[in-house]
Structures are given as C-alpha cells and as structure tokens.
Amino acid sequence: MGVVAAALDQAWRERMIAGLLEGQRADGSFGVHPYTKWTGAHWRLVSLAELGVPGRSRAARAAANTVLDWIAAPSEPVVVAGKERRHASMEGNALAVCCHLGMAHSLRVRRLVEVLLRSQWPDGGWNCDPNPDAHHSSFHETLAPIWGLAEYHRNTGEGRARRAARRAAELLLEHRLFRRTSDGEAIHPEWLNIHWPHYWHYDFFHGLRAIARLDLLTDRRADDAMELLLQRRRDDGTWRAGGQRYWRLRGESNLEVVDWGDAHEVVTAAALAMLQ
C-alpha cells in the first residue's frame, strides 16, 4: 500500500474499492469496452491503483488482463511529419496499473514500455494531434506516461524508462508545471484547479504528483506550483477537488461508478504526501 492509500480512512477506501469492482463479470470485464468513459476497466483500474488496491487482488488482475488484451495488441503507428501521434495516456495509465499489480515483467506490459519509448517526442512528451503543424507535446498525453514509466523503473530497474520519464518531467518543469514560457501566464485556467478523478486531464496538482514520483519536488522550477498547492489548502486543513468536474453519476456519458464528492479524503492525503 502506498503512502497516500495508507493515510486514507480505511472504511472509506474499502467502500470505494468495492464500488469500483462492482459488476465485474467472469471474464474480468465490466460488460463494456475497457476504455468506455468512465465505466470501463481501464478507468476503474486507475482509481483502484490510486486507492492502493492490493497487488494480489485477483479481481483487479483479471480486469487488467482485459485492458492488456486491448491496448497491448500490435498496431501500426500513426506517423505525421516525422512524429508518432499517440494517445500515450492510455499506455501510461495501463503501465502504471500493471506495475502496481505486480505485472511489470509481463511481455505485454513490456510492449507498452517499448511503445512509449518509441513514440516520445523530441521535447520529451507525447501528443495525439494528427495536425502536421503540431510540434509541441501535449501535457495531457504526457502526464500518465511519467507515472507509468516511473513505476516500471521502480519495479524493474529499467534505466531507459526512468530516463524517458525524466525527459518528460523536464518538459513540465520548463513550464513551471502550468505556465507559458512566452509570458509566464497560466497555460489554461483550468490547470490551476485540483481535479479528482482527473482521468487523463492535466492540472498543476497532478503535474506535481508526476514529478514527485521522480523526486523532483525540490527543483526550484516547481516552487510556483508548490505555492499554489499551499494556497489551495482550506481553513479546515483539507484540500478538495474543484473546477470542472469530469464525471457525473447520471446521464448518458462520462458516468462514474462511485461518488467521489469533493474527493477531500484522497486529495488531502495526496497533498500532504507532497508536503512531508
């Protein structure tokens, strides 16, 4: 169990884990494509890993295998203007989850690593934009690969994975995690909020969590984001999700299977872990 999971109210954590696994079928799936937002196995597993589901969980491993059946299948790369265009957040999240579940040495998991290493852009990140004029990596697509590659290195000692994660972190740090290099203003106002779950979306909070996995929080270029983190602390000592909510409990799309509310339980634990 990670630092964040250990700090959670365990009754709440166990209730959320049970809710995320509810409805699982005998084949490990949840009756929809693994990437269905947000009820598919891919997204449930990201939250389960964040909550520290036991790595020995047979249910979680069965779900992870359905994700690998989809994402680790061989496919032709899409190359435009000399750069591979890829939704690298998919491989990044799946890689992090599989490492958490003790599956890092699987050949299919290794394939995810090779895809990420192959498709990394010169500036250190990844991008799915097919526009040939796109020349800058997407922070959204770069966030999860840092998590996945850092976890893969931690589990296997693979130096190439750590170097790739470090290059990607450098991209975030060059922008002080949320600022334009041209004028120092915020790249997007939504990045100044904390989101949970964030799924594949970027914000300053999850940028900090990404570089923390590489022990880079003491880099002076992270100071602005760390100050923003302190500013987001409420009078009662907690942190809460705010800004745009990417999920809903009712409707036709973007449905969650559990009610995160303002997610203060897990957001506070994650914030405190970075400030220790």
Image (cartoon, rainbow, N blue to C red):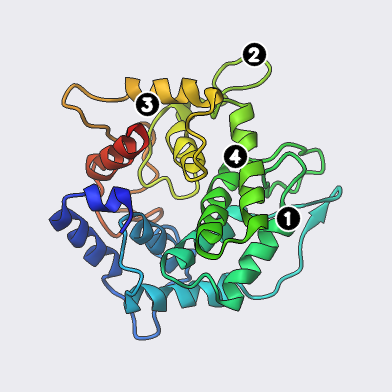
Residue 119, image quadrant: bottom right
Q: Residue at x 67, y 47 (%)?
A: 126
Q: Residue furthest right?
A: 81
Q: Residue furthest bottom?
A: 26
Query: Relative to residue 216, is residue 29 depicted above or below?
Result: below
- In the picture, measured across the screen, residue 226 lies left or right of residue 170, that is left
Element class at badge 4: helix
Label drawn at residue 169: 4
Q: Write down the residue under mark 2.
A: 183
130 or 55: nearer the viewer: 55
Q: x and y percent of residue 12 in the render?
A: 16, 54
For marks 4 and 1, give the one nearer the viewer: 4
Q: Residues within 10 Å of mark 4 (few under 14, many from 20)?
A: many
- The residue under label 4 is which amino acid type? Ala
> Disc 3 versus disc 2: distance between alpha carbons?
22 Å
Q: Residues within 10 Å of mark 1 (few under 14, many from 20)?
A: many
Q: x and y percent of residue 117 in the render?
A: 70, 57
Q: x and y percent of residue 211 in the render?
A: 51, 39
Disc 3 and disc 2 in contact, CB within 8 angstroms: no
Element class at badge 2: loop
Q: Write down the residue under mark 1.
A: 119
Q: Earlier in the sequence, mark 3 or mark 1?
A: 1
